[in-house]
Image (cartoon, rainbow, N blue to C red):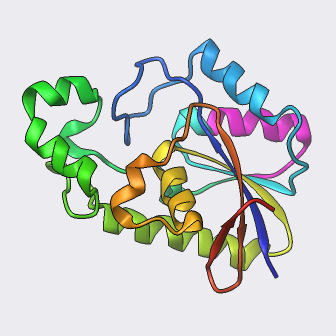
Amino acid sequence: MTLRLDLLRHGETELGGGLRGSLDDALTDTGWAQMRTAVVAAGPWDRLVSSPLQRCARFADELGEQLNLPVQRDKDLQELHFGAWEGQSAAALMETDAQALGLFWADPYSFTPPQGEPVSDFSVRVLAAVKRLHEAYAGERVLLISHGGVMRLLLAQARGLPREQLLSVEVAHGALFSLTVEADGSLKEGH
């Protein structure tokens, strides 16, 4: 049996762009609007699963209350931890650490930001969380409210992209994508 998994990225955050990672900033009014707009004609879902960071979890709670759906938080679906780069923009890093940033963009699996989480570890934890969701909710349709990195990883897997192309996957604030998760863990885009 398959799991229908819709992916919603959080909206714009108060502290702006850059590598937010494990920083727990709140959504702006625009960010709330981006997420509310994304789900208007979507669903229906059987349940909501969210990253515990407030930029995802507060919207999940609001939507769960509106739709009378259970909300589950899963810390394994949090964003990649960028270590010393957390909170910095790519532009700032180009001035202070251009070579390292270039290595990360070229192949995020082969270069880890200083004190950061290796992308290979991130991949293992995210895919394990999706496997748990399949085991628990196969046959259902679940909305996962998460982060750009989590969504890029899952979409890259579904599209069969080489690992070097992970960061080329476009995921805007408030973007909504649909996946099908098979029993063997394979991912397909669309329902």
Judged by its main secondary structure, the magenta piece is: helix
Q: How many marks?
A: 0
Against 66, is 17 above or below?
A: above
Give x and y (percent) for residue 84: 18, 40
Residue at 86% of width from left, 53% of height from top? 45
In the picture, measured across the screen, residue 56 lies left or right of residue 43, that is left
Which quadrant holds the N terminus?
bottom right
In the picture, measured across the screen, residue 175 lies left or right of residue 54, that is right
Is residue 86 visible to us here? yes
**Which one is nearer the viewer's eye here, 130 or 172?**
172
Give x and y (percent) for residue 170: 51, 42
Against 85, is 75 above or below?
A: below
Outermost residue toward the bottom in this view:
184
Against 2, is 77 above or below?
A: above
**Which one is nearer the viewer's eye here, 67 or 90?**
90
On the image, which quarter does residue 89 sit in?
A: top left
Is residue 88 visible to us here? no
Residue at 75% of width from left, 59% of height from top? 190
In the picture, measured across the screen, residue 114 lies left or right of residue 24, that is left
- Magenta stretch encompasses residue 187: no
Give x and y (percent) for residue 167: 39, 49
Residue at 81% of width from left, 52% of height from top? 70
**Which one is nearer the viewer's eye here, 2 or 65?**
2
- In the image, the segment drawn in magenta is 57-71
On the image, which quarter does residue 100 sit in?
A: top left
Outermost residue toward the top in this view:
29
Give x and y (percent) for residue 59: 69, 33
Against 172, is 146 above or below?
A: below
